[in-house]
Image: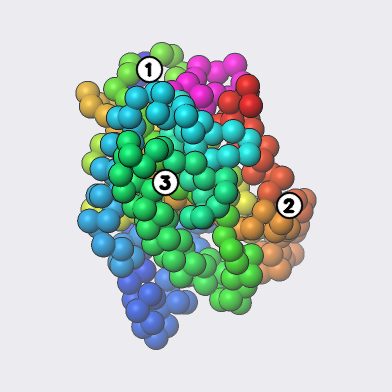
Amino acid sequence: MSSKQASTRLPVIDVGPYLSGVSGALERTAEELRAALEEIGFLSIVGHGIKWQMVQDMYAWAARYHELDDIAKFDHEMTSALMGYVGLGGAKRGDRPHALNAAFFMGRPGSKRNQFPDEALLPGFESAAESYYRTMERLCHKLLPLYAVAADMPASYFKEFFDPALATLRMSHYPPIAAELDQWGIDPHSDAGFMTLLPTNEVSGLAIKSDDGWFSVEQEPESFVVNAGDTLRAWSNNRFRSTKHRALNIGAGNRYAIPFFFDPRADTMIEPLPGCINDLRPIVVEPYRYGEYLQNFMREGYIPTAN
């Protein structure tokens, strides 16, 4: 298949001044975020304050995890009730070719839904994953006021819906396998939730769909690509974009990705925000409960049919 596509750099937003409490930074940064969400649905953030060594360590852990043999990984296979491992070919949608990635999913540290490989097989993995999860969760909580102000709502508006957040860490492996026609590392899709943070990857492969076609993403060093999901789109009354994207490893080596999905509580009712409704933007979205939407999303593409 042809992998040729244009290349682009996303809007880069420095959240450092806002996180440091600089006067006026909340409003200025929210204005930048609003423009990126309305025009593209994707952006990159720098100045996030996360030590990059922690990100690099997490990539290394992802590689070590996926080097385990199949018996060890399928010992904690993901089901409709439990997080865990989805093997190569497990992420399949309808009658499309299966996706060329395997992945490990984990939820909130301490959750009974989490499953991990035997500690003796990968000492320190569970602890490292939980530490990274908590670090990413703290950052996302700090970003919520930006999203509220971008949607013309009070800065504290989203806080109650993410107490606690329904967040997920995914560690994906894209092996160097030649793709068939219309086959991808992960199929073109939009995310289900509120926002996704994806750290800079040494191996490219991410592409997004703009109004002019597909574009490969050139990431800023030590940045996070951030995108809106379907839930933020619906909450904003379709004001913000939830943009389709895909991934494909076209290199000779392995590619790993560690996206962090930050979503509201399952019982949250998603209905258009007052700040996103006016005479020029009438209500176009029907309310729904987030947990029900997420279950359907996962059932369609990530839960093995046998379970």
* Residue 42 in the image: above or below residue 215: below
Near-viewer residue (64 or 13): 64
Q: Which residue is mark 3?
A: 259
Where residue 197 appears, as percent x and y from the top left, is 42, 52
Under circle 3, the secondary element is loop
Q: Label 1: which residue?
A: 179
Find out whether residue 99 is within the magenta segment: yes
Q: Is residue 245 above or below residue 107?
A: above
State the SS at label 1.
Answer: loop
> Which label was assigned to residue 289?
2
Q: Main secondary structure of the magenta part?
A: loop
Of the image marks 3 and 1, the number of the one nearer the N terminus: 1
User: Between marks 3 and 1, how big is the CA–CA gap?
Assistant: 22 Å
Q: Position of residue 186 (x, y in %)?
A: 45, 30
What's the residue at 29%, 22% (across, down)? 176
Of marks 2 and 3, which one's residue comes earlier in the chain? 3
Q: In the structure shown, which secondary structural element does the residue marked by tag 2 occupy?
A: strand
Q: Residues within 10 Å of mark 2 (few under 14, many from 20)?
A: some
The magenta-colored residue range is: 88-102
- Which quadrant is the N terminus positioned in? top left
Disc 3 packing (10 Å; few <14; some 14–19; many ≥20): some
Q: Amino acid at mark 2?
A: Arg
**Which residue lies at the image location 41% right of the left edge and 37% below the top edge?**
117
